[in-house]
């Protein structure tokens, strides 16, 4: 029997939206071994003069994170930012309540700003709206962004940083809808507090972009009513509404798991509609967008009790082939909803549910590293409205196409990219890519990741079980190119005009 066939139609005029580069962001929390032993470990043979892990920095640069959220997460809702600045020897050692760990405060705001510069990423700071006050939130904006000549800006200068950092992106708390959150609030109370924090923070720096807490996930009993209520308070003062979601193959049902894009699209649709509703209700002229500032796969390792240790091993999830195929789809959903999704941060970047795992001497690239890196490096310019003809397969979310596709085209550089997941567990698909307009001169690269074992994963002993391989490029003839897409594969086709 011949392989079944599929067709992908691209038209560089059929544009969904400009892709915000900030959708390729990461998140670093003071949790487990993300900061300590991940980013920062002065005792590692790979540490630089600042204690940053050079091998980790190199791998983070390879991904090319465009924005980095810090310092939490649940951690931020009990964090006193003043603990983390000034001479290290006088910083307090505290019991950290979100993860029941010991926080040494050896790494704080100034160290994070240095780290962000090292990996050339835009910093995005979260303020504590759990135990913290709106005054402390505004003081942190002053510390980071005000020119010297006032108390907190002079403190920054005293700590060795005379020039303001100019931090643009600020999260107004974290997951404040969750009963687990330190200082959790009802929607109405959070909306009022976030509004007042926003006003004060903007008085410190009128240029800041603010992100209000949306629902922690779509299973919350208050979803999406929380989002509507909060937006009705803060709509005129914020730039983004956050959403979070962690997916997992909890029932070990690969067909459904590989169709997870449906869940991600539903969540975006609901919140895009909520934004529209509130905008209309308030007769507002303002556009507020979405920031998916925690997203990833998390269900295998649920160890969240730090037992009052420094840098405990918490939620060090190991990622396999099926996880990488889900991450690739998630990023494709980001492109397909580029009209409303403008910021996204994978949670997290090292050790904690992350593309990278470390030992004292090694760094391991997990399976999900590769799709993240391929999207981040290649998807720029316009997101294209792709037409896909593909065989379908049954799932709990009705029939879904075997191929999940997104595409980008940058008119400024002429570079294009097509991202394709073949969800089939046994069928290779002969696929024709058809350019209806904007045919590229050539395909410059084809990167592919595939395998036969859904559960295969990289390990320190076998680090290259799953990587992306460069395939021989195929010609573009009469506006068409032919690809063979193996089952359980992710392919990124890069073109130039
Ligand atoms: O990323 C791990 C945790 O998940 C974050 O601290 C929290 O915001 C979310 O519930």
Image (cartoon, helix red, strand yellow):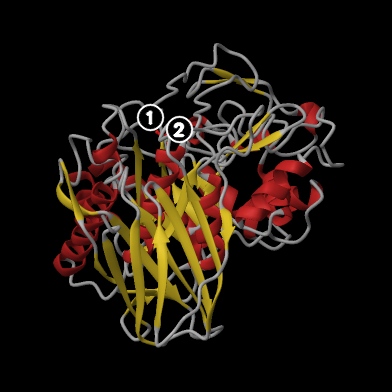
The residue indicated by pointer 1 is 181
Residue at 20% across, 42% down: 223
Judged from the image, the secondary structure of the residue bearing numbered disc 2 is: helix
Query: Furthest residue to the front?
Result: 1
Q: Nearer the viewer, residue 490 or 275?
A: 490
Q: Nearer the viewer, residue 333 or 239?
A: 333
Q: CA distance from mark 2 to mark 1?
A: 6 Å
Q: Nearer the viewer, residue 46 or 368?
A: 368
Q: Quarter of the picture for ligand 1?
A: top left
Residue 180 appears left or right of 366: left
Q: Is mark 2 within 8 Å of ligand 1?
A: yes
Q: Quadrant of residue 81?
A: top right
Rendered view: 384 above or below 54: below
Residue 101 pos. (x, y %):
57, 19
Residue 19 pos. (x, y %):
43, 70
Query: Furthest residue to the right?
Result: 49
Residue 28 pos. (x, y %):
57, 41
Residue 219 appears left or right of 299: left
Residue 319 pos. (x, y %):
48, 34
Tags 2 and 1 touching, CB below 8 Å: yes
Q: Nearer the viewer, residue 491 or 286?
A: 491
The residue indicated by pointer 2 is 74
Rendered view: 31 above or below 275: above
Residue 221 appears left or right of 329: left
Q: Residues within 10 Å of mark 1 (few under 14, many from 20)?
A: some
Judged from the image, the secondary structure of the residue bearing numbered disc 1 is: loop
């Amino acid at each position: 029997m011949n392989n079944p066939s599929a067709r992908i139609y691209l038209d560089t005029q059929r544009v969904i939206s400009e892709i915000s580069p900030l959708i390729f962001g990461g998140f670093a929390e003071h949790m487990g071994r993300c900061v300590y032993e991940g980013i920062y470990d002065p005792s590692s043979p790979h540490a630089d003069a600042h204690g940053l892990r050079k091998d980790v920095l190199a791998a983070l640069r390879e991904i090319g994170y465009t924005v980095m959220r810090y310092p939490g997460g649940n951690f931020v809702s009990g964090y006193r930012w003043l603990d983390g600045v000034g001479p290290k020897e006088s910083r307090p050692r505290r019991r950290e309540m979100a993860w029941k760990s010991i926080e040494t405060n050896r790494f704080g705001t100034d160290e994070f700003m240095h780290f962000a510069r090292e990996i050339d990423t835009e910093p995005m700071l979260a303020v504590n709206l759990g135990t913290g006050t709106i005054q402390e939130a505004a003081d942190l904006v002053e510390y980071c962004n005000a020119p010297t000549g006032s108390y907190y800006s002079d403190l920054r200068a005293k700590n060795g940083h005379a020039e303001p950092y100019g931090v643009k992106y600020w999260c107004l708390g974290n997951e404040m809808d969750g009963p687990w959150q330190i200082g959790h609030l009802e929607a109405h109370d959070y909306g009022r507090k976030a509004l007042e924090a926003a006003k004060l923070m903007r008085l410190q720096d009128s240029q800041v972009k603010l992100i209000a807490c949306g629902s922690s996930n779509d299973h919350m009993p208050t979803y999406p009513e929380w989002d509507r209520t909060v937006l009705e308070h803060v709509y005129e003062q914020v730039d983004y509404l956050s959403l979070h979601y962690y997916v997992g193959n909890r029932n070990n049902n690969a067909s459904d798991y590989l169709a997870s894009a449906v869940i991600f699209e539903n969540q975006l649709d609901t919140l895009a509609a909520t934004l529209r509703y509130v905008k209309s209700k308030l007769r507002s002229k303002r556009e507020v967008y979405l920031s998916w500032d925690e997203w990833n796969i998390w269900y295998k390792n649920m160890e969240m009790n730090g037992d009052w240790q420094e840098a405990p091993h918490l939620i060090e999830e190991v990622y396999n082939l099926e996880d990488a195929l889900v991450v690739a789809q998630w990023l494709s959903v980001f492109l397909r909803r580029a009209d409303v999704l403008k910021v996204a941060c994978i949670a997290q970047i090292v050790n904690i549910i992350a593309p990278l795992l470390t030992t004292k001497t090694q760094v391991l690239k997990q399976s999900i590293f590769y799709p993240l890196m391929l999207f981040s490096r290649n998807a720029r310019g316009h997101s294209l409205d792709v037409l896909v003809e593909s065989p379908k397969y049954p799932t709990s979310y009705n029939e879904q196409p075997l191929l999940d596709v997104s595409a980008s085209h940058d008119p400024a550089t002429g570079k294009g990219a097509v991202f394709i997941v073949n969800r089939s567990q046994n069928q290779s698909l002969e696929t024709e890519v058809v350019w209806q307009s904007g045919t590229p001169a050539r395909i410059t690269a084809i990167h592919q990741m595939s395998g036969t074992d859904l559960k295969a994963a990289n390990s320190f002993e076998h680090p290259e079980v799953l990587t992306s391989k460069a395939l021989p490029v195929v010609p573009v003839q009469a506006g068409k190119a032919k690809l063979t897409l193996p089952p359980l594969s992710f392919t990124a086709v890069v073109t130039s005009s």
